[in-house]
Image (tube, coloured by chain):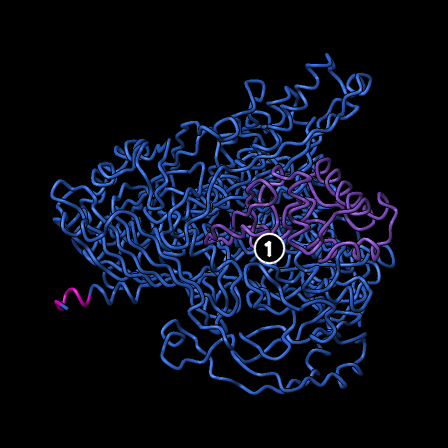
């Protein structure tokens, strides 16, 4: 949270959050409910929430890779696909983001929560 | 061991086997003829393994090799192939008798023997011949029709070409045979247990014999020494959190400290063969300290009750709903009914056991855990396994699936097989027994409810006050969502100005509830539609006119405060009116004497989709070099006919022949996320997403003037496009229960005609008439099949089915519906196009279950003057109610 915090909780655990200059709807684990609401500004706001004060170029490489893959294929890439595209080891990618790939990079890249089923 | 000579499908085979070995196992495992299926733990209850032995229909699970020397055996593979099917297989496909297809090979073999002997069987003769072949999907109506059609084919009175639909008149509204139907009818569809994995270990699972117990120690030393045992694993060997989380992380993959429910998994034994793994599991020594088990809602809520999960109150979730001012409703009311209702725990009862196979593909950190099971929609949940079993890289593939009815929204065998594949680093096959499958699957939540419904002097509904409690069981699964779903559809079809409700969820040490066809609303709609009849009687009104008067209309709001734009329910009542008059007339002469007849109706309105924000489906389409269109989406098809829906919509939108549509829907490694097959959402959401993708493709073709793949490439345009459909909905407010949960709904009304034996209390359903308005009908035969199967399941809920954890162990003890229970039905489809549905369509699979049990109970009261409010209405309950009435109690 960047000060505004959760404005409203719902029975399903969704909350509206103000990230940078706009409000977005997040699920109970902080994933964007609608990936179309993603922007670099939103990503920076989400990173700040996770304790990353600034997204550097390596972060953006991972984020852009995840987003591009998601927008092309409609799903998150498997590990071998990420490694191949980014040229880093999984350990290196995991270390870049608090929360690692799933709870960190994937969330900041605006990909949906893999758990969001029902 | 002994050598046997048997002739299988015309070829003499020499088989070396134990004399006691069932023919089914020899066919499936030794000869790899997997068309005959196993469902009932080889008890001869289901008929899925039926083959022909020396000209007789035989349950191959009961035939021992010792008795088969020189036998002539014909299996489903010996009849026909998908390319060249036998006329009986052709008839099953063309009659729409193939849904999941798990029972189909056995049905066809039994039908073959019947038709060999009797070329013109009556319906009664068909029922007798198929009386031990079970089907959960169809309600048996189309199976009866298929056998009659096959008889006409075999007598030469008709040819398949005369029955095939004329697709030149258009694909929408055509009963096109499902693209996968011939595979299923010919035994060529590969279900999970049919998959052969080279070098695979078979696993067996040690399960708690206690409903609630601390695990003091697990000694695996003896088990490890057993012949053929390759290893044993317990909770400490799980790499991840060991907690499966849907909404609450309360379910262990393997129990660590405590078992919360009878049958909870405690250890996994891997063996070279299933028999060796099972023997190893027997040798695992677990020391338990039994704890007090709370087995009912009352026990769980009693002061000082043992907590199922320590530190967590047994009352684990509550959600209120408030619309208007309920006290004003009672002030305005001329008549009020108030009553308790309850519904029972039910097993969804898909015929296929919870089979799963898993293996690692690749090495090191890139290794992918591949899980093959019964429902691709749970790939989301398998992703959850990343935490539960500690592996990031998971791909899910769906084999052909033998029905699911909601079960596959839960992880069942997948977590155990996946964890075992990771631990033993070997391919794993986990083919559990039927009893074990019953233990590991979620059930329909039992519900207790107190309901109060009022109407004013003009017969207008004034208010509804409901308090309901769902028994969660040992784990939450989707329990909270089920409470919400009941509230999202609480007011049913009607305009009720004032509503007050409270939904609660309570842990017990019982089997846990989950997503069961309809998932909540079937339970509550039974109470509401029963109360509607009670109130109509109290007001002296006609049940149909009372419902018509109180139907919601566009511009009015549901109990969630959602103002609706479309509500075609009144048309359903109008369509039923002449049928109701006919039925009443016929029943009127059966109001005296031992056997009495009655007629009852009930309505239903069912929201499409997952409710609340975030219901989204993504589907991709690609124009192929040969002019075909490939559709990519993780879209489960456990039998509902999604293959036909996608093919017909895509072919219609592209102007292609159906043969030019390819579906890639069974591998999360190749498909966009189309989310779950739940909430009857697949046609609306994934069909809709596919049409959006096709629009993008056609736009690109139009802009570039390209008509083919090659021309698109030449124009520099992509050949693959994605479409995403998102419902514009909102969550329920946690305090008021107000919100906009659904964009669209399916509506309908059902009429039950029943006969009651007043000396035994036995209710027989004579006929169900179902009017359903589901918007544009894409494939009438598929829709009818869904409705007929749902009616059968609804009648089972009303009269017969009850799962008792620990006692229900197989299909007989569960009272699985047979063809003998099947009843006549009439389906009337209305097609008010929905504003946001793909070509105006919505789904129908779950809705069917909403009105049935209330319609049957309303018919019971019409016949006898007594009502059963606590399901199932067994003969004992009905007889007891009639005796109490007679005694003036």
- At x 78% / y 56%, what residue is drawn? A94
- At x 38% / y 55%, what residue is drawn? B735
Q: Which quarter of the rendered picture does the N terminus of chain B lie within? A: bottom right
Residue B537's place in the image compared with B700, above or below, is below
User: Can residue B106 be spotted in the picture?
Assistant: no
Q: Which quarter of the rendered picture does the C terminus of chain B lie within? A: bottom left
**B702 or B885: nearer the eye?**
B702
Image coordinates for residue B383, horizontal then vertical, percent? 68, 55
Is B886 magenta? The answer is yes
User: Range of the magenta residues?
Assistant: B883-888
Q: Mark 1 lies on which chain?
A: A
Left-right relation of B628 to B786? right
Image quadrant assignment for residue B231: bottom right
**B604 or B186: nearer the eye?**
B604
Q: Name the residue under label 1.
A: A29
* Letter of the blue chain: B
* Letter of the purple chain: A
């Amino acid at each position: 949270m960047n000060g505004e915090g959760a404005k409203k909780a719902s029975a399903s655990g969704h909350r509206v959050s103000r990230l940078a200059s706009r409000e977005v709807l997040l699920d109970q684990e902080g994933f964007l409910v609608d990936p179309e609401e993603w922007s670099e500004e939103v990503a920076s706001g989400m990173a700040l929430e996770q304790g990353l004060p600034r997204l550097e170029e390596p972060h953006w490489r991972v984020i852009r890779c995840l987003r591009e893959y998601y927008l092309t294929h409609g799903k998150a890439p498997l590990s071998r696909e990420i490694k191949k595209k980014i040229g880093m080891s999984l350990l290196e990618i995991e270390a870049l983001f608090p929360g690692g790939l799933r709870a960190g990079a994937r969330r900041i890249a605006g990909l949906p929560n893999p758990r969001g089923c029902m | 061991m002994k050598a046997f000579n048997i002739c299988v499908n015309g070829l003499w085979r020499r088989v070396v086997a134990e004399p006691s070995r069932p023919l089914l196992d020899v066919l499936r495992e030794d000869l790899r003829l997997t068309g005959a299926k196993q469902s009932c733990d080889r008890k001869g209850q289901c008929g899925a393994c039926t083959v022909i032995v020396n000209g007789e229909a035989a349950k191959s699970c009961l035939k021992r090799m010792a008795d088969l020397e020189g036998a002539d055996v014909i299996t489903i593979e010996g009849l026909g192939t998908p390319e060249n099917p036998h006329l009986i297989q052709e008839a099953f496909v063309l009659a729409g008798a193939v849904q999941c297809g798990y029972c189909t090979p056995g049905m066809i073999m039994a039908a073959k023997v019947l038709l060999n002997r009797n070329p013109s069987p009556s319906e009664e003769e068909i029922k007798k011949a198929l009386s031990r072949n079970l089907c959960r999907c169809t309600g048996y109506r189309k199976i009866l029709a298929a056998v009659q059609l096959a008889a006409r084919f075999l007598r030469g009175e008709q040819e398949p070409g005369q029955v095939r639909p004329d697709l030149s008149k258009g694909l929408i509204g055509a009963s096109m045979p499902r693209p996968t139907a011939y595979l299923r009818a010919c035994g060529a569809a590969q279900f999970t247990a049919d998959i052969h994995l080279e070098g695979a270990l078979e696993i067996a699972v040690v399960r708690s014999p206690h409903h609630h117990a601390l695990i003091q120690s697990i000694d695996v030393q003896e088990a490890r020494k057993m012949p053929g045992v390759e290893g044993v694993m317990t909770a400490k060997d799980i790499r991840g959190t060991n907690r499966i989380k849907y909404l609450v992380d309360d379910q262990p993959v393997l129990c660590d400290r405590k078992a919360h429910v009878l049958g909870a998994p405690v250890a996994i034994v891997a063996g070279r063969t299933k028999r060796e793994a099972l023997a190893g599991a027997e040798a695992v020594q677990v020391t338990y300290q039994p704890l007090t088990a709370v087995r009912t809602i009352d026990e769980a809520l009693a002061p000082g009750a043992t907590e199922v999960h320590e530190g967590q109150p047994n009352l684990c979730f509550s959600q209120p709903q408030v619309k208007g001012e309920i006290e004003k409703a009672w002030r305005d009311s001329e008549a009020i009914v108030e009553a308790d209702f309850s519904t029972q725990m039910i097993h969804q009862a898909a015929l296929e056991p919870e089979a799963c196979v898993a293996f690692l593909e690749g090495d090191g950190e890139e290794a992918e855990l591949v899980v093959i099971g019964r429902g691709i929609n749970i790939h989301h949940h398998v992703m959850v396994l990343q935490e539960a079993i500690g592996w990031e890289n998971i791909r899910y593939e769906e084999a052909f699936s033998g029905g699911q009815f909601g079960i596959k929204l839960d992880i069942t065998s997948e977590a155990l097989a996946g964890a075992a594949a990771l631990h033993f680093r070997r391919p794993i096959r986990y083919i559990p027994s039927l009893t074990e499958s019953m233990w590991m699957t979620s059930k329909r939540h039992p519900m207790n409810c107190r309901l109060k419904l009022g109407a004013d002097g003009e017969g207008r509904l004034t208010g509804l006050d409901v308090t309901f409690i769902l028994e969660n069981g040992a784990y939450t699964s989707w329990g909270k969502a089920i409470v919400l779903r009941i509230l999202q559809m609480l007011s049913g079809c009607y305009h009720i100005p004032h509503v007050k409700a409270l939904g609660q969820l309570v842990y017990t040490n019982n089997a846990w509830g989950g997503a069961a066809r309809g998932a909540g609303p079937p339970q509550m709609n039974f109470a509401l539609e029963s109360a509607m009849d009670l109130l109509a009687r109290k007001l002296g009104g006609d049940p149909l006119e009372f419902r018509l008067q109180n139907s919601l209309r566009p511009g009015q709001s549901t109990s969630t405060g959602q103002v609706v734009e479309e509500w075609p329910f009144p048309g359903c009542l109008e369509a039923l009116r002449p049928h109701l008059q006919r039925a009443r007339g016929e029943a009127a002469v059966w109001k005296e004497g031992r056997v009495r007849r009655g007629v009852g109706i009930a309505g239903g309105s069912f929201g499409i989709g997952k409710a609340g924000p975030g219901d989204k489906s993504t589907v991709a389409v690609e124009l192929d070099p040969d002019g075909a269109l490939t559709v990519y989406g993780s879209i489960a098809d456990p039998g509902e006919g999604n293959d036909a829906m996608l093919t017909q919509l895509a072919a219609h939108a592209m102007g292609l022949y159906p043969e030019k549509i390819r579906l890639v829907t069974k591998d999360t490694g190749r498909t966009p996320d189309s989310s779950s097959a739940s909430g009857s959402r697949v046609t609306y959401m994934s069909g809709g997403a596919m049409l959006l993708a096709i629009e993008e493709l056609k736009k690109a073709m139009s802009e570039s003037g390209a008509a083919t793949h090659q021309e698109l490439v030449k124009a520099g345009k992509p050949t693959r496009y994605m479409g995403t459909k998102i419902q514009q909905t909102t969550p329920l407010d946690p305090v008021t229960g107000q919100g906009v949960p659904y964009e669209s709904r399916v509506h309908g009304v059902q009429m039950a005609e029943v006969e009651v034996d007043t000396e035994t209390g036995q209710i027989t359903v004579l006929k169900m008439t179902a009017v359903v308005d589901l918007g544009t009908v894409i494939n009438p035969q598929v829709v009818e099949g869904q409705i007929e199967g749902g009616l059968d399941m609804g009648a089972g809920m009303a009269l017969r089915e009850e799962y008792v954890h620990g006692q229900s162990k197989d299909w007989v003890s569960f009272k699985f519906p047979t063809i003998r229970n099947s009843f006549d039905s009439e389906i009337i489809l209305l097609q008010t196009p929905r504003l946001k549905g793909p070509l105006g369509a919505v789904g129908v699979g779950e809705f069917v279950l909403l009105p049935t049990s209330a319609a049957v109970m309303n018919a019971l009261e019409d016949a006898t003057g007594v009502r059963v409010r606590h399901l199932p209405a067994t003969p004992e309950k009905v007889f007891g109610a009639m005796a109490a009435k007679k005694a003036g109690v």
